[in-house]
Image (tube, rainbow, N blue to C red):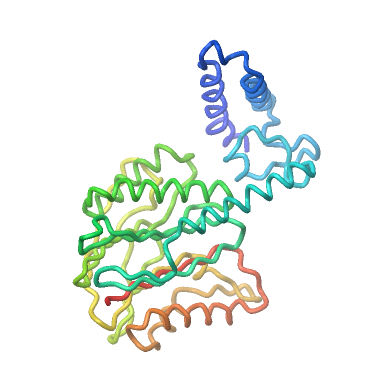
Amino acid sequence: MAEAVSTHYLPQLEERRRQLLAVPPELSAAPEIIRLLGEVDAAIGRVREGCFGLCETCHDPIEEDRLRVDPLVRFCLDHLSDAEQRDLERDLDLAARVQRGLLPPAELALPGWRVRTHWQPVGVVSGDFYDVFRVDPQGRSAYALFGDVAGKGVAAAMLVSHLCATFRALAGAAPPVSELVERINRVFKESALSPMFATLVCGRLDADGRVELCVAGHCPPLVVGRTGVRTVQPTGLPVGTFYSSSYRSTTLRLEPGESLLLYTDGLSEAADSAGNEYGSARLEALVGTLPPGDGVALLAAVLRDLAGHTAGVKLTDDVSLMVLTPA
């Protein structure tokens, strides 16, 4: 905790203090400004005393994701007041509804493509994300984004929203996929806390079945077809790892009867009652036995097999899948 405090939280707190001191004179005496300044000064004092991030009631560490969202918190979840608990539950419920509402439909038709998705958060909100949209409503291509932000909880969910908004803003100019991911990486690295990163797959979908893909440290996508299963290997590091990371892309052409399957590590790392992970090898073996070209059946079969593997065991990570099939 000490290293995280010195590297991340103290600069945040000092910047908040500078912003509060810079308000116009007519606002500086407002009760809310005075209260916030006092809370920031108290938090800075806790950093210097070495007790920042510890609950003031039980002295155990406060949940890390809550500190990342608000470094002024002073109590762990177990020692919030009843009113604070109700406020937190209401905020989490709203955050979950907002996050779910920002996802595209579970089934989506694009020029030349059918898209099926599954999103299964293990908690109230999720660090998994995906988005699909047409840059030009009259155009014949679209962009798809799919991935996973490191971490869980509200902090990860907030970074998901930021990452998806960045994706839409930068993709509007229809750049090459590798260039788009490089720009996303720089924006994400500049704005996220240093330890945070995201694995993702970014693709441009053309109506003729061509897909330009950049796989930034994510689980290798699978091309499933009549001739078997092949993987698409990563073409770069997770975004947020290094500011100057470069990325390359690979181009595929999916024929009728083929599908592209994307998944998060919540699937491949899901454990059974004996601790055995589901694994990418099991996934490849499963999808290789399925009738080609049916995205709905492919998605259903994977989820059914995962449920059988984890029967009686609670999932510990979010599970998301996307199936892209030429129309």
Give the number of callouts: 0
- Who's the residue at 33% across and 86% down the image? 292
Is 38 located above or below residue 147 in the figure? above
Is 304 located above or below residue 9 in the figure? below
- Who's the residue at 59% across and 33% down the image? 5
Please indicate whether residue 233 sits to the left or right of residue 8 in the image. left
Image x and y of residue 273, in percent:
66, 76
State the residue in front, 294 or 12.
294
Farthest residue in the top direction? Answer: 25
- Who's the residue at 56% across and 56% down the image? 97
- Who's the residue at 29% across and 68% down the image? 110
Image x and y of residue 285, in percent:
42, 83
Please indicate whether residue 162 sits to the left or right of residue 207 in the image. right
Task: Name which quarter of the figure residue 177 lies in.
Answer: bottom left
Quadrant for the C terminus, please.
bottom left
Is 247 located above or below residue 284 in the figure? above
Task: Name which quarter of the figure residue 33 lies in.
Answer: top right
Image x and y of residue 212, in percent:
24, 63
Image x and y of residue 99, in percent:
51, 54
Quadrant for the N terminus, please.
top right
